[in-house]
Image: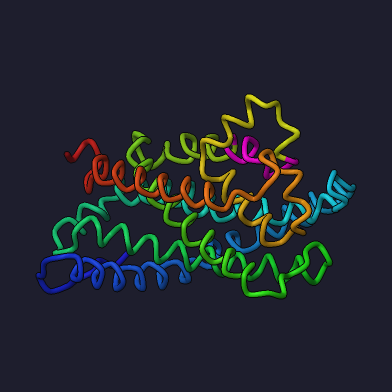
Amino acid sequence: MATTTATVGRGPVHAVRLGWERGKLEVKEFFRQRESVVFTLAFPVILLLIFGSVLNYNIPGNINFSQYFVPGILASGLFGVCFQTLAIQISIERDKGILKRLEGTPMPPAAYFLGKIVMVLTMVVLESIVLLAIAAALGKVTLPDDWHRWATFIWVTVAGTAAGSLLGIAFSSVPRSGKSAPATITPIALVLQFLSGVYFVFTDLPSWLQHVGALFPLKWIAQGYRSVFLPDSFAQQEAAHSWEHGRLALVLVLWAIGGLVLAIRTFRWRAGKDS
């Protein structure tokens, strides 16, 4: 991967400018990896086709499970790209010495973080467009016809991407090497999907598992997307009998802040053997 060069500068404006330039480079690098692009865009669609066909039954609230499943897959795709893919990617880049080379440039960690978030947000937007287009064509979801719901979709996506990306950056320091990163991170992401009501109705979980799932952002991202694509009457089927937009926003903001603090404290340019 090419390194970003820039003139020396200071302050947040400089960091944002460098982060934006780094983000554009990250996006270009992503699109050069055609296999990764195809897998990222196709995997949620494959899950939708499989689960949407097998689990074709009505759930409380008088909707088909496939309608419930689409928001969950959207949330899972977002969090998978932000947390799982990003944590693994950064671990591998650190192991290969790519971050060590970036350390010698004028780019501060904050700019590197922003660049990754720009890349991840681009992936999330493309993934969402493809999944929603296919789901709508198959009659698995009804797209909103008012701007309020789309506004909710946008802020949930932005807040969820920020929280998931910063957590992914922070967690990238946990694996001992790039080779061990998938084995370390993937099981955690998979468990969170089951705890967050992605593959089945969240309220079908035992109450204590619902409380555990509610501690993590994926549950709230999925709930936010359900508020966009499901009828308002379905809010009564949620654990709190409402969409809880205020609490949802608070949880995602707190996770984003916590992820930023952890990322700043744990991020390192070099692998352990080079530190």
Residue 259 relative to residue 199: left or right: left
Q: Position of residue 19 (x, y in %)?
A: 28, 67
Residue at x-position 70% and y-position 60%: 45
Above or below, 181 against 244 in this view is above
Q: Is residue 120 magenta?
A: no
On the image, which quarter does residue 21 sit in? bottom left
Q: Position of residue 16 (x, y in %)?
A: 25, 68
Please name whichever residue, 238 or 174, is drawn nearer the observer in this view of the structure.
238
Residue at x-position 80% and y-position 72%: 137
Colour option used:
rainbow
Q: Position of residue 163 (x, y in %)?
A: 43, 51
Q: Please state, as top left, top right, bottom left or bottom right, where the C terminus lies in the image.
A: top left
Residue 48 relative to residue 247: left or right: right
Q: Position of residue 5 (x, y in %)?
A: 19, 71
Residue at x-position 85% and y-position 44%: 60
Residue 218 relative to residue 15: left or right: right
Residue at x-position 67% and y-position 47%: 242
Q: Please state, as top left, top right, bottom left or bottom right, where the N terminus lies in the image.
A: bottom left
Q: Is residue 192 magenta?
A: yes
Q: How many marks?
A: 0
Q: Which residues are magenta?
A: 191-201
